[in-house]
Image: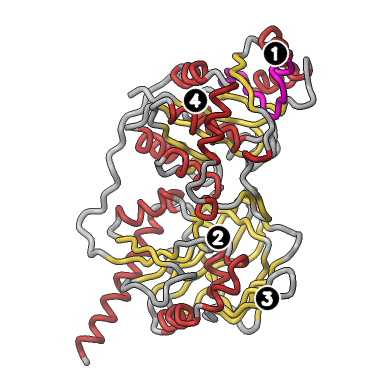
Amino acid sequence: MHRPRLVIAGTHSGVGKTTVTLALMAALKARGLVVQPFKVGPDFIDPGHHQLVTGRPSRNLDGWMLSEAVNRSIFSGASADADLSIIEGMMGLFDGSSPTQEQGSTAEMAKQLQAPVLLVIDGSAMARSAAAMASGYARFDPALPVQGVLFNRVRSEGHYRLLQEAVESETGLSVVGYLRPDPTLTIPDRHLGLRTAIETGHCDLYERLGQSAAETIDLARVEALARSAGGSFAKDLPVTAGRQEPVRIGLAYDAAFCFYYQDSLELLEAFGAEIVKFSPLHDACLPEVDALYFGGGYPELYGAALEGNVSMRAAVKEFSDGGRTIYGECGGLMYLTQAICDSEGGRYEMVGVFPAEAVMRKSGMTLGYRRVETVRTCLLGQAGTSLRGHEFHYSLLEPKGALEYACTLADAAGKPVGRDGLMRGNTLALYSHQHFGSRPEIVVNLLQAVRQEKTARQTVKGLR
């Protein structure tokens, strides 16, 4: 089946890929198209904005965390009923997990999906030099189909015509238009990136971005580039696990905890989990569930509110103390410690499962892909289980007692970078985020652990 698709790539980080991507998605949707969004790389924030624009869950594709087969399967399944797919790249077009190899880059993903690339260039201070830049990116990898250019931050039609003439006459690439700089069409950012979609809400920003794109971008040419994609995709059969005892997973979801991969959640459901959302910020008690899942997010920005929800913190602590299953990542790990200390000296009491405090730093961000290997049996599997994830945080753990770790970490090149995976009873929390698609067996292991704990609890209850 033919799947029209287009990769939106940048010359470098900060060139405005997300703004361009959201503008194109909004404009194409306004033309009546069903647009399926994707994001290259481990980012959680951009996909949330994609979903608000298109009304469809955005999917992460990643050449380092996921195999080519998994990436193609994710793309195939999500794009089956769409008119066109827009795939937002990461960093610069050729930036990935290595300075000399393409793995993890936007370029690699474009080749895996046989998708044409639309290159975003900041044209604010260039004229003919733009042709040299476009030519270099287009010719750097002959196997990469860079087919078009879109300029960002161009103030006038006259300046754009200079850029268009230079690039089209010198390179033969299709120049599809430009976006003007407009501070009112900018999503505010913070220490880990843009504000999340759950905070932004359904505002008119996206519609205005789409209107701006329609004024200065040739959307018909954009569609034509997407429809020029070669190759075809078979429709994958859904993942099934046969008959499994259902388990209810309480998913922490609010402004403090909203970093989840859509495909990880769907893998949980495919293997028998029912996802039940709750809010550690606003709910007074836990839902009736068999396990809890605390994803990443910005708990440090909501320290006072999380601390103030005493009944929720007590309920989570009781859940853990009772031997119930809890899995956490990054922000979830921070919430499960004794306290979060912000960079201004504030200290906020948290759940207290682990004898440590999460201390925010003003600089010194921890960032990178991670090879994770279990060194003891835990919720992820037996000792020796390996998987791939990434870290992205400004906080550090400050131990206040003995800590037990379940995993070791190495970077993308295999260099050891420390330990991860705090354990206490049936609670496991990691700083590293895991994409369950990197190794679906961990979903089986996690849910099996939940089922075993549930069975044991019911047995004890029946003996009383």
- Is disc 2 placed on a helix, strand or loop? strand
Q: Position of residue 260 (x, y in %)?
A: 47, 55
Amino acid at circle 1? Arg
**Is 130 within the magenta?**
no
Q: Which residue is mark 4?
A: 115
Rendering quarter of residue 90: top right
Task: Say whether disc 3 or disc 4 marks the residue closer to the N-terminus.
Answer: 4
Query: Which numbered marker is on residue 161?
Result: 1
Q: Residue at x 46, y 74 (%)?
A: 427
**Badge 2 local density, few (<14 within 10 Å), some, or many (20+)?**
many
The kind of residue on which mark 4 rests is: Ala
Query: Which residue, given by chain and number where applicable, does mark 3 sit on?
Result: 398
Q: Is residue 176 left or right of residue 113?
A: right
Badge 3 marks a residue whose secondary structure is strand
* Circle 4: element type: loop
Instruction: Write down the quadrant of residue 146 in the picture.
Output: top right
Q: Nearer the viewer, mark 4 or mark 1?
A: 1
| Residue located beneath label 2 in the image | 297
The label nearer to you, 2 versus 3, is 2
Seen from the viewer's position, the closer of residues 276 and 263 is 276
